[in-house]
Image (cartoon, grey):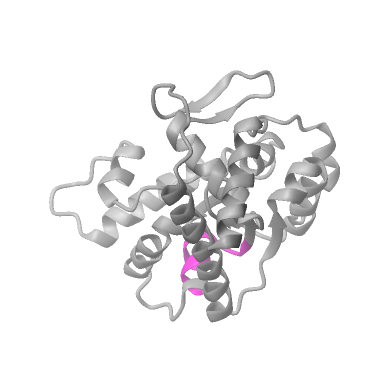
């Protein structure tokens, strides 16, 4: 029997969460984790799950329908709900969770009221220069994820050549650093000791990292041995050049 009913991957962009989500989904026993509440907007959530709230429905009633739909999607036919939360929409999400469960005294109680026993996972990328470069380059090129064979999995805009943008990279570096600090502050405030995972460990040993998560969830870690990778790294010579330049700029600032 699993130790938890749900898990939440607390992260920020370009930290390896797409790889981790794909690995967990591929096990067939650990839900279908994704950013089920990605946009900070009830209207977007309604559209995402193709809901049609009744005229005059209250906000808690609408949220209840949204959460039921998200939980069904995030379980993926298993008994465990998987959710990825990014910092940019986190405050909005927890605000709506408070609307749905006004009688609970803190965020952890509200998460458990919504999802049951919940494991919090903090997935971070310690090298914020690498993370900033990866994010800005993906924004510029439009390409966010590719399969192991090079097939594009996620493209958000037409292809274009990346151009080094010092101001944008520095701003992204500061934002990603702040996101980590905000997660840590929330964990401390809520008395949470999350399962801590790093981008580097996940990248170097994805199966081993998956085994750790399955074991903590109370699932058979041996299931990880049959899982194939669904995405591959996009880093190339451009990334390496930008990382070198940005590090130099930050060191001399």
Where is residue 126? Give x, y as percent.
66, 58
Viewer-side residue, 185 vs 59: 185
Q: Residue furthest front?
A: 252
Q: On the rendered structure, is 173 left or right of 158?
A: right
Residue 233, placed above or below residue 110: above
Q: On the rendered structure, is 150 left or right of 202?
A: left
What residue range appears in magenta?
109-120
Which quarter of the rendering shows the N terminus?
Answer: bottom right
Q: Quadrant of residue 180?
A: bottom right
Q: Would residue 16 be visible to someone looking at this image?
A: no
How many numbered markers are drawn? Answer: 0
* Residue under the image location 60 percent in, 33 percent down: 238
* Residue under the image location 67 percent in, 72 percent down: 193
Where is residue 249? Give x, y as percent.
55, 55
Residue 103, placed above or below residue 154: below
Q: On the rendered structure, is 31 left or right of 139?
A: right
Viewer-side residue, 71 vs 179: 179
Q: Quadrant of residue 232?
A: top right
Q: Quadrant of residue 148?
A: top right
């Amino acid at each position: 029997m699993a130790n938890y009913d749900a898990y939440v991957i607390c992260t920020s962009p370009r930290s390896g969460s797409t790889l981790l989500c794909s690995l967990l989904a591929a096990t067939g026993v650990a839900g279908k984790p994704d950013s089920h509440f990605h946009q900070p907007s009830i209207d977007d959530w309604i559209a995402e799950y193709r809901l049609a709230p009744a005229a005059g429905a209250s906000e808690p009633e609408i949220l209840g329908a949204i959460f039921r739909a998200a939980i069904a999607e995030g379980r993926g036919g298993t008994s465990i709900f998987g959710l990825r939360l990014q910092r940019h929409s986190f405050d909005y999400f927890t605000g709506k969770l408070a609307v749905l469960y006004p009688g609970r005294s803190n965020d952890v109680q509200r998460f458990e009221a919504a999802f049951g026993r919940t494991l919090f996972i903090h997935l971070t990328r310690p090298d914020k220069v690498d993370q900033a470069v990866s994010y800005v380059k993906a924004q510029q090129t439009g390409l966010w994820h590719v399969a192991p064979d090079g097939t594009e999995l996620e493209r958000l805009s037409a292809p274009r050549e990346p151009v080094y943008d010092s101001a944008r990279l520095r701003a992204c570096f500061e934002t990603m650093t702040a996101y980590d600090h905000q997660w840590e502050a929330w964990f401390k405030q809520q008395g949470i000791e999350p399962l801590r995972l790093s981008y580097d460990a996940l990248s170097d040993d994805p199966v081993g990292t998956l085994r750790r998560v399955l074991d903590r969830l109370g699932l058979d870690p041996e299931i990880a041995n049959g899982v194939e990778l669904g995405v591959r790294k996009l880093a190339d010579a451009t990334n390496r050049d930008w990382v070198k330049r940005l590090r130099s700029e930050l060191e001399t600032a």
